[in-house]
Image (tube, rainbow, N blue to C red):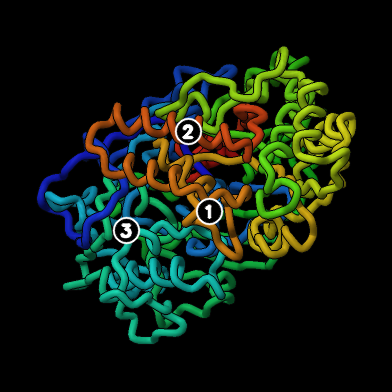
Amino acid sequence: MRRSRTVALTAMAAAAVLVVTGCSSSKKSDDAKSTATGSSTEAAGGSGANAATKGIVNASDKKGGTVTFEMKGTPDSLDPGNTYYAYIYNFSRLYGRPLTTFQPGAGEAGNKLVPDLAESLGQVSADGLTWTYKLRAGLKYDDGTPITSKDVKYAVERSNFAPEVNSNGPTYFKELLVDNEGTPYAGPYKDKTGDLKSIETPDDTTIVFHLKHAFADFDYLVSAPQTVPVPQAKDTGAEYVKKIVSSGSFKFESYEDGKQAVLVPNTNWDPSTDPIRKQLPDKIVLRMNIDQATIDKDLLAGNAQVDLVGGGVDPQTQAQILQNPKLKANTDNAYGGRLVYMAINTDVAPFDNIECRKAVQYAVDKVSVQTALGGPIRGQVANTVLPPDIPGHQDFNVWETKDNKGDEAKAKEALKACGKDSISTVLSARTERATEVAAATSIQAALKKVGINAEIQQYPQGKYLADSAGAPAFAKEHNIGLMMMQWGADWPTGYGFLQQIVDGRAIKASGNSNLASLNDPAVNKLLDDAATNPDRAAREKIYGDIDKKVMEQAVYVPLTDFKVFLYRPDNATNLASTPAFSGEYDYLNIGTTK
């Protein structure tokens, strides 16, 4: 769900110390590893439109004040081990430190991977099967107790091996780590020994991962909040979100589910152990379930500093801003490795027939969808799964129509080849996302012209993947054949974008991101081939080949390569639009002049 562009990785100096080993199979690799640990991005040389896409706007070390985040709807979870939205990956770094993270900065500077909880990026064995990290010295939780490597191990166990409790996040670790001597690990809530043998903690500062197959993107993987340490004694399962233990520069003062969270400085955070965080505001307030028009007004008035979801202002506010040069000067319009698309569920008849899927591909008027999403300023029409700012992107158009406006004749021909005169199905969209619902409405009208009747059903974004579109049994039972979605890379490589949405082995009973239920052995093998190929150019070609193969199966309808259109208040400091988090502002060091 998250990133863009390339960040390089190669073997590190020997100081690290988290280890991983295993058998031999296949996953990923990268060529040059960054060793930087600071946040040296230059401040933008003044404000102006798109200034935060080029540097840090209003760079400041001023302490004090309250930084207010607002959001429409609620997050899937603030628990770092149970989330899969880019904006929570971004926000959670305020109270949780993963092993690695992305340096605060704009553009390519924001794609720079740096050590966080770890001293350095990983030390990898010659066969690529073992990764070792050593934690920084002097790390403490907000209660003053020491952070240990066992807490990182436990965090991975609870987030990847307990779907009955934490189902929202991806399962890369579960897929990569060696099984317990051939026996599947039951997870920490069922196996109280915590003895997942593929993660070793020889001492309190060393963690070692043993993999089934080489995976050179592993430093990216451990940047996920799933490596934010959790002390086992403090884990209350599904209730942990109500009392999260902080390892970051801020801690929770209060949490009201669906309403508000308040963070205050963590007095046990030691800046000498943390070269990228500043701990500026006296308080950070996250207000939930706020109407988007209200959020926009609060941003324009300076009563809020950030729209947490980071998708940009609504269409009415966008029009207001574009007509006012002063307001437009405070905007940032950027790609962030995001794709807006519609999934065609191959588990729901008649879309198990490719001819019926072709009918949908040909029927959609993508220009109309683009208009519903806010016009070209919110993204170009897309015809591939991989966005143009993800390595491996190739330009092609398998289901081409004139000017991208759809082709009724071809759609009807495909429908006939499918043996259907008409189709009745459900098209799902997220309630809180007005432009997504508008895009779905545009698609509904286009489909109706060719005999496909799609009833739009809306579901809350916080439960969209857990309980509705992302729960295959629910989707099948409720005839959800078409699903609106937006996707950003988990990290800035082709694998980081593609794997969770096209790999059949990633399909889950809940929290599923492979909405098309695509399980093609050829696609799965290509992903494995890319993962183990030491040549970057060869890997990127494979990602382009995967994209073509997926598009030929007509399971996804790419709509637009999404662009954010963000407004930054004058009283917000340290704002940088980062591709590492889908074009959102980097939330780590935002302060206020108030």
From the top left corner, tell me how far across and down residue 52 is, in percent.
Answer: 51, 26
Q: Using the image as rendered, state which of residue 268 and residue 180 is in the foreground.
A: 180
Camera-side mark, 3 or 1: 3
Mark 3: few/some/many CA within 10 Å (<14, 14-19, 20+): some
Mark earlier in primary sequence (2, 3): 3
Gap in angstroms between the C-alphas marked 2 and 3: 28 Å
**Rendered image: mark on residue 282:** 1
Q: Earlier in the sequence, mark 3 or mark 1?
A: 3
Which amino acid, mark 1? Asp
Compute the Cα span from label 3 to label 1.
16 Å
| 396, above or below 373, in the image | above
- Asked if labels 1 and 3 touch by Cβ distance under 8 angstroms, the answer is no
**What residue is pinned by disc 2?**
579
Q: Is residue 333 left or right of residue 371?
A: left
Mark 2 belongs to which amino acid? Pro
481 shown above or below 263: above
Question: Which label lies toward us, 2 or 3?
Answer: 2
Q: Residue at x 76, y 34 (%)?
A: 417
- Residue 150 horizontal side relative to residue 489, left or right: left
Mark 1 Cα shell of 10 Å, populated few (<14), some (14-19), many (≥20): some
Task: Say which quadrant the C terminus sits in.
Answer: top right
Task: Name the residue beneath numbered marker 3.
Answer: 270
Is residue 583 something one can see in this rendering? no
Is residue 460 rendered to the left or right of residue 493?
right
Circle 2: element type: helix
| Element assignment for label 3 | loop
Which image quarter: residue 22? bottom left
Residue sitting at x 37%, y 65%: 268
Where residue 137 appears, as percent x and y from the top left, is 21, 62
Going by the numbered disc 3, the residue's amino acid type is: Asp
Residue in the foreground of this view, choosing between 119 and 76: 76
**Residue at position x 27%, y 60% in the image:** 212
